[in-house]
Image (tube, rainbow, N blue to C red):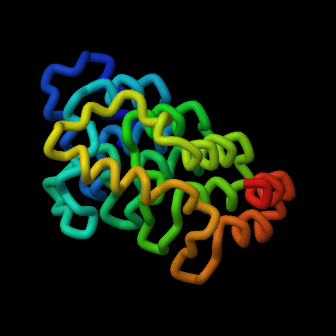
Amino acid sequence: DGVKLSKIMSQGLLDENIVRYRDQEGRTPLTLAAAQNDTVTAEYLLNIDAMKPNFSVVAETKSDDDIDIDTGDYVQNWSALHWAAYNGNGYLASALLSHGAALHNRTRSGSTPLMIACAEGRIATVHVLLGADESLDAVKHVKVAQKDYAAWRKRATRQMFMSPKLRDRNGMTALHHAACAGSFECCVALLQS
């Protein structure tokens, strides 16, 4: 839980493999930090090479041992980016995206981070997520091996201009979520994107 995470972080990270740890609910330290809106800890974890995205593993074939920046929990499959969107932490969302987090990573219910930000009325985070769709330049800190570059480029290109059009398992788009939440600002941002 969060208390254990803070205790580990205050003692310093003795073993880089700690980022690959999962608690009983499948949450990684990065996911916990994002859920607690702890930007400092999340940034520290992002700067550890072990958290870089694994482009050689297809999302559908990931096992519980394949832990990276996009790893979600066992219950709802919420990643750190989903939590940043939920908490309205645009700064953390931007940091996660610049380290290669998948913009269209889905929860078990099919929600993307953009849908979650819209459902919570987090307009600043909605702008960050919509802006990430505009350019591959948002990914600054990802070091992609030559053999993985084609897979990375395909994934990054596929993400461009898709967020507002995706639907969750209930058939709802980000615009539906914003309208249901009564967030006029999010609706306008989506319609203008």
Q: Looking at the picture, how far across and down is residue 79, in whole percent?
A: 40, 52
Rendered location of residue 68, percent (x, y) = 26, 45
Number of callouts: 0
Q: Nearer the viewer, residue 29 or 7?
A: 29
For the residue pair 22 and 130, the one nearer the viewer reads as 130
Q: Quadrant of the C terminus?
A: bottom right
Q: Residue furthest bottom?
A: 170
Q: Quadrant of residue 61?
A: bottom left
Image position, residue 190 (x, y; %): 74, 58
- The residue depicted at 53 percent of the width and 42 percent of the height is 135
Q: Is residue 193 above or below residue 59?
A: above
Query: In the image, what residue occupies the spot 43% across and 53% down?
Result: 157
Q: Nearer the viewer, residue 179 or 77?
A: 179
Q: Please state the horizontal and vertical placement of residue 59, each as a whole percent of the image.
A: 27, 63
Quadrant for the N terminus, please.
Answer: top left
Q: Quadrant of residue 98?
A: top left
| Residue under the point 48% across and 44% down | 35
Residue 138 placement, left or right of 48: right
Using the rendered view, name the quadrant where residue 158 is placed.
bottom left
Q: Is residue 138 left or right of residue 4?
A: right
Residue at 45 percent across and 23 percent down: it is: 40
